[in-house]
Image (cartoon, rainbow, N blue to C red):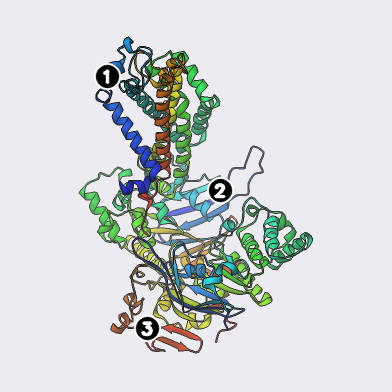
Amino acid sequence: MNRLVQRLGWPGTIALGVVLVIVLVAVFAPWVAPYPQQGVGAPNVAAKLSSPSAQYWLGTDHLGRDMLSRIIYGTRVSLTNGVLIVTFSLLIGLPVGLAAGYFGGWIDEALMRGTDIFLAFPALLLAVLMAAALGPGFLNSIIAVSVTWWPWYARLARSEVLVLRGQPYVEAARLAGVSHARIIARHILPATARPLTVQAALDVGPALLTAAALSFLGLGVLPPTADWGQMVDAGRKFFPARWWYSAMPGLAIFIVALAFSVLGDALRDRKGGASRGAA
Amino acid sequence: MSSAPILEVQDLVIRYRARGLFGARAKPAVNGASFQLARGETLGIVGESGSGKTSLLRAILRLLPAESGSVRLEGQDWLALKGEALRRARQKIGVVSQNPFLSLSPRLTIAEILAEPLLAQGQRSGPEMQNKIAGLLSDCGLPADFLQRRARELSGGQAQRVAIARALALEPGLMILDEPTSALDVSVQAQILNLLADLKESRGVSMLFVTHNLKVVAHISDSLLVMRRGEIIEYGRTEQVVRAPTQDYTRELLSFGRGNEHSANAG
Amino acid sequence: MALLEIRNLSVAIPTPEGDVHAVRSVSLEIERGEIHGVIGESGCGKTMTGMAALGLVPKGARIAADRFHFDGEDLRENAGRLRGRRIGMISQDPAAALNPVLSIARQMDDVLRAHRDMPRQARRAEAVALLAATGLPDPERVLKSYPHQLSGGMQQRVVIAQALATGADFLIADEPTTALDVSVGAQVLALLRKLVVERGLTVLMITHDMDVIAEACDRATVLYAGLSVETGPVGNVLQQTGHPYARALLAALPDAAPHGAKLAAIEGSIPPPRSEINGCAFAPRCPQAMPVCAMQVVPERALAAHRWLCHLPEGSA
C-alpha cells in the first residue's frame, strides 16, 4: 500500500480505488443492486418519480425504477463502452502508426494523410454523423466513437516508433540481419506498450463520456438497457422538479470520468519503475 | 598481401539529398573514396566531425545510399544486394558502435542480446546455442554469470565487451568498429584495445576502426586513412603515416598533447 | 596566498542505501594566473569538486573541509555569491549553455547589464571587445547570430566571452574541449592560455584527457576514488610520475606502448562509491602493493612542489 502511494501519489491511489470499486460494481451488479429486476428494466410504476428516500436512496425514474439500481447496471454499459472504444482504437491505430513510423517514406505519407482526414473533423460531430449513419445500438455507438479515436493512437504510436527506430540498439539488430517483423515484435512493440497503455487508461474516461453523449442524443444503447447518458436525457423532461433523475447519472459519469483521468495522469508521472537503474 | 582484399572500395561518392525541390545540390559528404582492406588486417579511418567518415561507414553498412562507385566485400558486389539477400549477407559484417548502453537493448538480457543475430540467421535455440553464446562471452573476457544480467547492470567496459561478442556471433570476416572506445575511460579503453588485438589474432578477423582519435587507432591498425571534408587526404601503412605524415593536418593531430608539455612553471 | 585553497574537501551525498562518497579527500591549491588541471577517470570526483567550488552540490549533500577558501572567502558560505561574479563556469556542451532562441547580442547584453553599470552603447562596444578577445573573427556578425548558426568551437568561445563579461577572474572549465574536434579543442585551449597571460585569468581545468593536461596546464592534480593522490607541475606529474595509479593511467594510453603491443590495462575497478576506504584506495589494483598499503594511512611523498601519496619511498618507481 505504501509503495503504491509512493508510486502513484495520493490522488492516483484514490482514483485507482474508485476505478476498482466501479469495476467490481459492474461485475457484481446483480448482487450489489438493491432492485436487480428494475436495474435490468422491469417497471415499478407504483413508485414512479419518488424522491430520494431510505427505500430508494437515489430516487426513482418515470417508470418507478430505483435510480441506484439503474446506475449500477449502467456501469456495465459505460465501462464496456470506454474499454471497447479504446481497444478498437488501439487495434486500428497501433498497426497504422507502427507501419507509418517504421517504414517511413511513401507508406508513412499515405497512412498519415489518411489519418489526417479523420482528424480534420471535429471528433464529436464525426461520431454523431457515424452513429446516425449506422443507426442506434450498443456496438454501433462504439464503432462510431472508435472511428474518431484511433487516429490519435496512430499518431502517438508513430512518434514513439520514430524515436525507437533511430535507437542504436534497433539499428544494431538491423545490421545483424534481424528481419523487420522480428525487430518490430522484439524491440519496437514492447517499448511502445507503456506510453500507449498510459494513453489508453487516460482515454477510457473521455471515451465513455463521448459514448454517453451519443446515447444522450439517442444514438447509443436502446432502452430498457440502463445507460447513464440516456438516463440524463430521459430525466431532462422532469428537470428541475425531479432533479435527481438527471443529476444522479450525471454525477456517476462525472466521477468515473474523473477517476480514469486522474489515474491516467498518475500512471504517466509514475515514479521509479523499471528505469531505476544502478547508480 | 597475397590473397584478395576482404573489402575494396572504389571511387565511392556519397551525397545527401538536397533540401526542398529547388535546393542547391549538396557538396558530396564523401568525394570519391578508394581504399582496400587486406584479410586479417586492421584499417584505421580517422576524421573529425564533418570529415565524411561516418557517411562512408554508413554507406558500407548499407544504411546510406551511395551515389556512385563500388564496394566489394569478399569479392562480391556489396552495393547490388537487396532485400532478403542483403539481410542474409549482413552476417558477413559485425558492427560495434560508440555507446554500448545505447546499442544494447535495455529490455533484453545479455543472453537474449547475443542470441538475436543467431536467431535472425535461422539458427535454432537450444543447448547448442546456449553453449555458443557462453563461449562468445568468455572469448570477450566475461564470465557466464553475466548472461542473465541486463546492460544497465554492467560497467561501460563490460557492456562494450558484450557488444563485441554480439558482433562476433555470426563469425563475420569483417568487423566495423565505430568509435568503440570513445565513451570509455582510458584504463578501460586499454582493455578493449587489447581484446580487439586478441580477437584479430585468434580469429583472423579484419577490422575497420573508425575514430576521431588518431593516437588510439594508430596503435592497433596496420594501415591508416585520414579524412577531411569528404576527401581522403592521407592513406598508407601506419608506421609510414605516423613517421612521415604528408599533411600538416595529420601532423597536428599527432602532435597534440603529451610530448609537447606546456611547461612555463615546470620545475 | 593561493587563489583557491582546498584542504581535505569531502562531499557525501546521502541516499537510502547509504552515503555516496563523491569526494573523499581532495586538496588543491590553485595560484593566481595558472591553469590547474584536475584529471581522473569517471567516478573520481573531479566534477563534484568543481561543483562544490561553484556551490552547486546536490541538495542534501554534506560538505566538509579543513579549508575551502576562494581569495580568503569561505566557499561554504559564499560560493553562491561568488559564482557568476568572480567564478565563472565553462561546461562540456556549449550548445546547452546558450539559449537557442536568443541572439548572441541579447545573451551577451543580459550578462553585461547584470554585472556592469554601463549605458547601452558602451555595453554593445564591450560585447564586441569581449568576443574579439576570445578570437572570434567578425564579432559584429557573431552578435547578430543565433547559437545554432555557430560551430561548436565558436559557441565555446562565446561562452568564454560571457564568463569574462561577468568580470570573473577564475574559471572552472569542465571538459571544455571533449565535445570538440581535436584541432578545434587545441584552439580553445590556446585561447584559455592567452587569456591567462593577457588578463591574469586563473583556470581550474577538469578533464579525463592527459593530452589536454599536457597541452594547456601549468600544474595538475590526479584524482582517484574521490582522493587527490598526486599534484605538481605538469612536467613532473607526467614524466616523473609518483603515484602508481597515475603511472598506470599513463601506461594505459595507446601511444605509451610500441605499435601493436599489448597495452598495460589496469586490472580491477574503482572502489564502490559507498564503501569506506582504509589505507591506500588504489592498493587492491596496485602491482606494487605491500601489506602495509591496505592498512595504514598513506604518507605524503614530496620532491619540491611535486607531491603524491604512497607507501613506496621516493624514487622507487
Q: Residue furthest left?
A: B127
Which chain's residue wears label 1?
A: A
Please give left or right for residue C122 compared with residue C33 in the image.
Answer: right
Residue A49 vertical placement versus C27 (above, below): above
Quarter holding the C terminus of chain B is: bottom right
Quarter holding the N terminus of chain B is: bottom left
In front of the other: A272 or A152: A272
Instruction: Say which residue appears at 58% left-offset and 65% top-offset.
Output: C90
**Which amino acid is tagged 1?**
Pro
Residue B14: which numbered mark, if any?
A: 2
- Residue corresponding to mark 3: C298
- Residue corresponding to mark 1: A36
Residue C105 vertical placement versus C48 (above, below): above
Task: Work out whether residue C63 can be spotted.
Answer: yes
Q: Secondary structure at mark 2?
A: strand
Q: Secondary structure at mark 3?
A: loop
Could you give the CA–CA distance between mark 3 and mark 2, rounded to whole angstroms? 59 Å
Q: Position of residue C56 (x, y in %)?
A: 51, 65
